[in-house]
Amino acid sequence: MGAGTPGEFKEAVRDQWTHAADAWRRWHPKFAQMTGAVTTALCEAAELRPGQAVLDLAGGTGEPGLTAAQEVAPGGRVTCTDFVPGMVATAEANAGDAGITNMAFQQVDAEDIPFDDASFDRVISRFGVMFFPNVQQALGEIRRVVKPDGRVAFAVWQTADKNAWFSDLNGLLMSKGLVQPPPPGMPSPFRFGALGSLPAELAAAGFKNVSETPHEARMEWPGPPEEYMDFIQATFPAWRKGLAEADAATREDTLAAMLDIVRSWWNGSSLQWSGFIYIVAATP
């Protein structure tokens, strides 16, 4: 994102994802279906039960919070949060569309969670923790707000080489000079891709009973390659920015090459590939 300090990174995130919020709402149903296997694995690891209070950090367009809200009903409630106000509004709108009423929504920085100690039975985050600049600060806050008998669960990507669906496209954009690797020490999608890296952070923050389970999550986009291309151009801020700033010839060549990659996932009725993740859970 071209941000060299944690503060600059946060401002870049807020700016880029604010501009993408409307597109994320448009594509939410299909994206939720695409990542449904990840949401299911995460909610199972969190051991959700009716009546629980759940905090969803970096909740984006609403998942896994929307699914968690149904798991903890009746009597339970999910507080869905995100660092970007536009994404919070998108999640709230998606909950309204789904008729889910046992949710609250709030803009929250995971490094400064504005809730009392021991407020939640569960804290969950799907593909969020790797983007917290000061992960120890965030984990300390998470441990503070979860109840002593509570549980936390996170989903993170394994290494880029195991997730060719992303790295092939991102590598193509990097080869054209349209995106840059993150500065050393800055957050990235594969920050906790190495086995044991996130568990080590949790242990350092004082968590106990840490488990790390690898999953091969089946990913499916219920539409043709051209539609998926529209989705990623609208919702992946760094890719959208790089393509928008490219000259016309480079943009045309790059989009054609990206479409060739996406077409390789097409089975005649949907796009299918595997996403390799870790589900990491712990107790405070």
Image (spheres, rainbow, N blue to C red):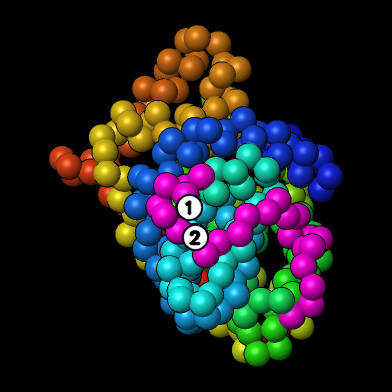
**Residue that numbered label 2 is attached to:** 101
Name the residue located 35 percent from the left edge and 45 percent from the top edge.
30
Amino acid type at circle 1 is Ala
Q: Is residue 178 left or right of residue 134?
A: left
| Number of marks | 2
N-terminal of the pair, mark 2 or mark 1, is 1
Assign the N terminus to one quadrant of the image: top right
Which quarter of the rendering shows the C terminus? Answer: bottom right
Task: Please report the residue visible at 81 percent of the width from the left and 48 percent of the height from the top.
Answer: 6
Which residue shows up at 63% across the image and 55% down it? 105
Q: Residues within 10 Å of mark 2 (few under 14, many from 20)?
A: some
Q: Name the spot of residue 238 as percent of width and height, x first.
A: 60, 33
Q: Tell which of 124 and 55 is nearer to you.
A: 55
Task: In the rendered structure, find residue 95 and report the number of the disc placed on it.
Answer: 1
Answer whether residue 187 is visible to the viewer in this image: no
| Residue 16 point in image, percent of width and height | 65, 34
Task: Write the start and end of the magenta stretch as one range.
Answer: 93-118
Q: Are marks 2 and 1 in contact (CB under 8 Å)?
A: yes
| Relative to 130, 76 lies left or right | left
Q: Which corner quadrant of the image does residue 146 belong to?
A: bottom right
- Relative horizontal placement of residue 282, taking residue 33 as reference (left or right): right
